[in-house]
Amino acid sequence: MKKRKLWVVRCAVLLAAVLCIGIGVIRGEHKDVEKKATNICLQCIGIG
Amino acid sequence: MKKIKKTTKRSFIQLIAAVLVNGYAIGFQRGSIFTGKSKALCVPVLNCYSCPGALGACPIGSLQSIVSGYKYRVSFYVLGMLMLFGILLGRVVCGFLCPFGLLQDLLYKIPAKKLNVPGKVDKCLRYLKYVVLFLLVILLPTLIRDEFGFGTTYFCKYVCPAGTLGGGIPLLIKNEGLRQTIGALFQWKLTVLIVIMVLAILIYRPFCKYLCPLGAFYSFFHKFSLYRLSVDKEQCVDCGVCERACKMGVEVTKEINSPECIRCGACMDACPKGCIHGESKGM
């Protein structure tokens, strides 16, 4: 793949990633991730 | 002065990464998990957020828990983070940062007759991780709901060996209350973990090759990621040493940036002509 094309793809994905994170934060998804991760996940450890 | 091999440097980085990701050491002693604000951030590796030492959230666990909840059908936040890690690092994450990858690397060092998976079987099995990603991590948790509108985190619940090893076992050792609730599900998950660990003695990184949904996700971005390898075709003498050194089964001279490459650097160490380079040299 030509270097220029490679950089275009990289920048596009990077931009999309930042955009997705931004949308996620606006929707409050990070709070749900935090809530889930700060409680013991019984399914993850094989109990619930 | 003797040059330090890339694979030796990698082992050192893997160890540091495993310690950093699971830096809440007191959690192991107390049998509880970290509850700080950093848990809102996903780590780039498969590391259960119910591991007592975990300082961040597992991206695969987070993705499933968000899409299986009642609020959202798509998790932009987790997908964005995964895309970010994917484009910046690709499967360097698997080779250098993942604690479960480190465990498999260590298990493979145990002297035993190694199993050679036949080419066609190996090729078919490699697609399994994409099935795991789409079916167990995305589709089933999104589509199948109970009467209250909640889905199940199928991968975490029935497959993830990192959850059993990093979260289940340490918590159950320390927590009497949890110990009394274990049943058939835990026995199933323990069996999965043991099978994967035994296989890891015989086959190099079987979980990464065939089952890991995170590796599958990163492999989509691997070809475009910032860190890439290149072969100097003019210097290469087609001796095949690099391909014999690659434990992930990558055809180094044909497709060095294969989605299966975890950038372990074994090919670079093995090349007698030194014609395999990191992308930074070619930029």
Image: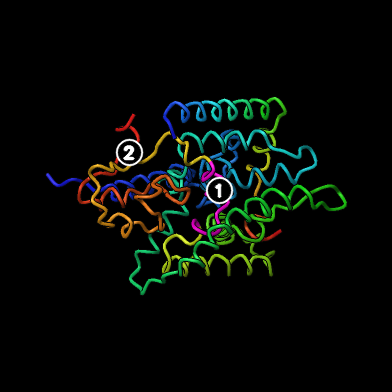
Q: Give the mark nearer the N terminus: 2 vs 1.
A: 1
- On the image, the x and y values in percent for residue A4 come to 44, 26
Residue range highlighted in magenta: B208-220
Residue hosting label 1: B214
User: Which of pointers 2 and 1 indicates the residue nearer the eye?
Assistant: 2
B202 left or right of B188? left
Q: Which colour scheme appears in the figure? A: rainbow
Residue located beneath label 2 in the image: B278
Magenta highlight on residue B86: no
* Front in this rendered view, residue B97 or B115: B115
Instruction: Identify which amino acid the numbered label 2 is placed on.
Output: Gly
Q: Quadrant of residue B103?
A: bottom left
Name the element at disc 1.
helix
Farthest residue toward the right? B147
**Residue B264 picture location, percent across and down:** 36, 49
Majority secondary structure in the magenta region: helix
